[in-house]
Amino acid sequence: MRCIIAVGLLGLATGCAAGRAERGSSTFAPSAVAVMQAYDLESRFHEATDLGRFAIERARLLKDAAGEARLQAELGRVLTRQLRHEPGMKEADVLAVLLRARQLAEASGDRSALAAALDAHGMFLYWDKVVAGRGEWAPVVSLFERAHALSEEAGDIRGATEMLFHLGLTRQMRGDAAGARGFYERSLALARESGDALMQSYGLRHLGDLSEKDGDLDTALARHRECVRLREQVGFRTGQVFALIAMAQVLTLREPLSEEALSAVQQALRIAEEAKDPASLRESHAALGRVHLRRQDAAAALSHLEQAMANAEAHQDWLTLVDVQLDVARTHALRGDTARVEEWLRRAWAITTARGLDVVLEDVERLGRELGVALR
């Protein structure tokens, strides 16, 4: 990522130095977007948004309508991610940026810019549905489908690769594993064809999850190992956290006392602490809790799970909070504390139903049946 930032900043300098739109606009906006994306992947949101706002003003001066629209879309995408990391931001302000990006893109007539704007809007609605339980899936899918069609028409391979991946996410979150696999495989094939290591890592990560759910642990582990390697290769540090956690999950399914699994999640936590990334920190603590739970070390498990819960609640990540509460219930079951098991299952049930978290409802009910707690 550092290399991308350096190259992108050089492109920015070139674009800024050019005095006329026809000389500067062709390199300026793409360079600014590349640097914003690199900052975003390192969770350096304030640097990304500061650059985005500066670049939008510059693109306007250069009379680069398509570039301004593309930058506005990227700003909206970064703000959407920042919204999930920093409670207190106003969702209406982020949505206004995204709608402005669509207006600018439609006015410019640039298909790639419009695809980016539609995709960014779709991701805002996607996270609102997944994390907060708000909205419906149909508008999300419609935005991603339109964005994919426009990317293909424009010959934008990276754009098409991303949109296919995002369509896979909508299928996976609705329980359609076969549909998700089809989109992930198409996205991965495009990423391999174009040599896009970052997008390959995304496809492999989620295909690995599907292989795990199918019980094909060897394939799942191979995919997660490749994902870790690719994210190390491109310097996607926070992405490494999630890849290491996924790999550890499969390792513990194969061998509950796996030392490699414990080492992987400990490495994930170190990276998260260095990055000071709240999402990576809560997922790392949650993963360490699960690893210790499988090792039947209830005290160590609870220590990490409690830190993950506090983080999730502070950042209003209700989906993660429910997942961790289920693991807390499992930990108390290991201790034989039936009263605490029921307490935590009912807490998870209350949040799931109150927040409309349909994607995790079945997991809550299943664990209730397994542990003998009637939730309805």
Image: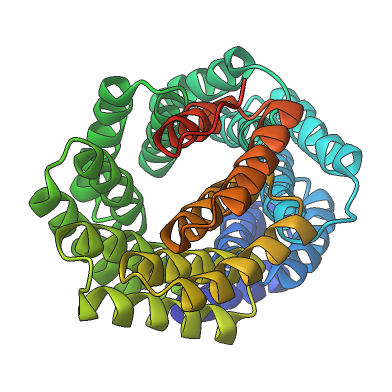
Image position, residue 217 (x, y; %): 13, 50
- Up the image or down, 190 lies above or below 329; here it is above
Residue 7 seen by the camera:
no
Left or right of 9? Residue 223 is: left
Residue 248 quadrant: bottom left
Q: Position of residue 374 (x, y in %)?
A: 56, 26
Q: Residue at x 39, y 44 (%)?
A: 158
Up/down of 321 relative to 32, above or below? above
Q: Is residue 233 visible?
A: yes
Q: Nearer the viewer, residue 94 or 256?
A: 256
Instruction: Name the spot of residue 93 as percent of width and height, x first.
Output: 90, 43
- What's the residue at 74%, 31% (across, down)? 355
Of 222 and 312, which appears nearest the observer? Answer: 312
Q: Foreground residue, 43 or 369? A: 369
Most foreground residue, 121 or 245: 245
Residue lying furthest left in this view? 218
Image quadrant where residue 17 sits: bottom right
Q: Residue at x 63, y 30 (%)?
A: 357
Q: Place residue 265 in its image quadrant.
A: bottom left
Residue depicted at x 57% and y 66%: 305
Residue 358 in the image: state x and y as whole percent: 58, 25
